[in-house]
Image (tube, helix red, strand yellow):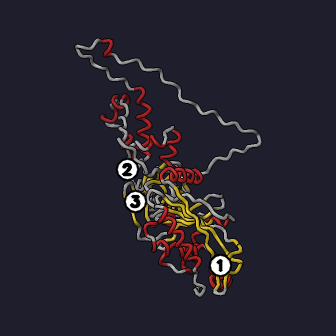
Amino acid sequence: MALVEMVMPRMGESIMEGTVLKWLKRVGDTIEQDESVLEVATDKVDTEVPALEGGVLKEILVKEGDVVAVGAPIAIIATDNSEDTDASASPAAETTPSATDAAPAPAESTARPEPVARLDQPATGRFYSPLVLNIAREEGISMQELEYIPGTGQEGRVSKKDILAYVESRAEAPQQATAPVQSSPSMPAEAAAPAPQPAPQPAAVKPAASHSGNSEIIEMDRMRRMIADRMVESKRVAPHVTSFVEADVTNLVNWRNKWKDEYKRREGESLTFTPIFIDAIAKAIKDFPMINISVDGGNIIRHRDINIGMAVALPSGNLIVPNIKNADQLNLNGLAKKVNDLANRARTNKLTPDDLSGGTYTVSNVGSFGNVMGTPIIMQPQVAIMAVGTIKKKPAVIETPQGDLIGIRHFMFLSHSYDHRVVDGSLGGMFVRRVADYLENFDMSRTV
């Protein structure tokens, strides 16, 4: 019997670990190749993990709820049903303790954890995974304190192991005996003795919230907690500034009204305003490439790919942001296809981690909820996001060679939030103005 290790797969760039949500198979179950074995959650998406080899599930190595690093073994699969005497002998051999194993290790039982040295300077702007933030919250570690914890992860990130070691070290710190002070010949013994320390005060306990019988307590689901952590972190890291522009989009409204029925008959799906907005944003990014950046400590990373994310509302009410890779290389029909595909797969929980990674700019259509405008929060590590409001008819002054007239036009607001650390008001304002210009000057002769 050949035994094959099933490992935690890589599920997108920058994803270093996943949480086992649910095992879909039990020990002894037969598994077909590419059949789903378990559900895994990352900080980007929940997904099912298929088996790369068919066979029998011999052993499950991690429990539901465990956080597992990418590449770590999670199960053992036997590729046929025959018994392997060598394999069956190994556990027996392992259960027989050697003389060395049988000897007690008193040093380990009395050893205290090594104190975790705090950083000399706070690591501001560092990314923290939702798991690390949850542990910090449960242990009463503030964001200021978290910034001084040294990280061993990629780019100095704090891993689960780092924060747990810090928590254990911090718990042991009050119990450490104060080092004796040696008195010098000229110093009296009384002066050499350490000053008595005041008794530690009990930590302030937050009073329990009181709710009447008319209140319903609803626990946040995992995605809502993750969204909450990301939004708080984004506002903490990036100073947000928002610029607003009102655009006359009469031409594009008339163009869509002309094409939407024919497009529905030809393609079998809807032609919405979203691909038109994304097309205008992609053009404006090419005009202002310093909007298509991210911040890494003291460095600015300028991205050549233009990957535009779009916020999608899920049936649960939560939001998820898949992105269109290389949006500037697609025509309107290609953008419409991608928008519909991502929206449909988002609502049926069929997105992959790759759909949610690599975004460089985001657009949120708050107009779909009937909102006139909004002040969106930036998706880290991006530096800007745009909200497009609902399109409304308004009376407007129309300039003609014969004079000014009053007419009915279609208007909408564009709201552009940007990270003021790296995007100044001039760039942020000119960018949203350029997007409005592309929408206002929409070519009525375009085809789709």
* Label 2 crowd bin: few (<14), some (14–19), many (20+), radius 10 Å: few
Residue at the left extreme of this rendering: 185
Disc on the earlier residue, 1 or 2:
2
Q: Which residue is mark 3?
A: 2
Disc on the earlier residue, 3 or 1:
3
Q: Secondary structure at mark 1?
A: helix
Residue drawn at (30%, 12%), measured in percent from left and top? 189
Q: Please state which amino acid type lies under the numbered disc 3.
A: Ala
Can residue 345 be seen here? no
Q: Nearer the viewer, residue 345 or 68?
A: 345
Residue 126 % position (x, y): 42, 51
| Pair 3/2: label in front | 2
Residue 405 figure quarter: bottom right
Left or right of 148 in this view: 391? right
Split into 4 quadrants, where in the image is the C terminus?
Answer: bottom right
Q: Which residue is mark 1?
A: 250
Residue 20 % position (x, y): 51, 52
* Label 1 crowd bin: few (<14), some (14–19), many (20+), radius 10 Å: many
Q: Please state which amino acid type lies under the numbered disc 2.
A: Gly
**How far apart are the alpha carbons under marks 3 and 2?**
39 Å
Q: Secondary structure at mark 2?
A: helix
Q: Is residue 144 above or below residue 351?
A: above
Q: Is residue 193 above or below residue 259?
A: above
Q: Are the residues at dot 3 and dot 2 in contact (C-beta closer than 8 Å)?
A: no
Q: Nearer the viewer, residue 63 or 311?
A: 311
Left or right of 382 in this view: 338? right
Q: Which residue is mark 2?
A: 156
Residue 245 % position (x, y): 59, 68
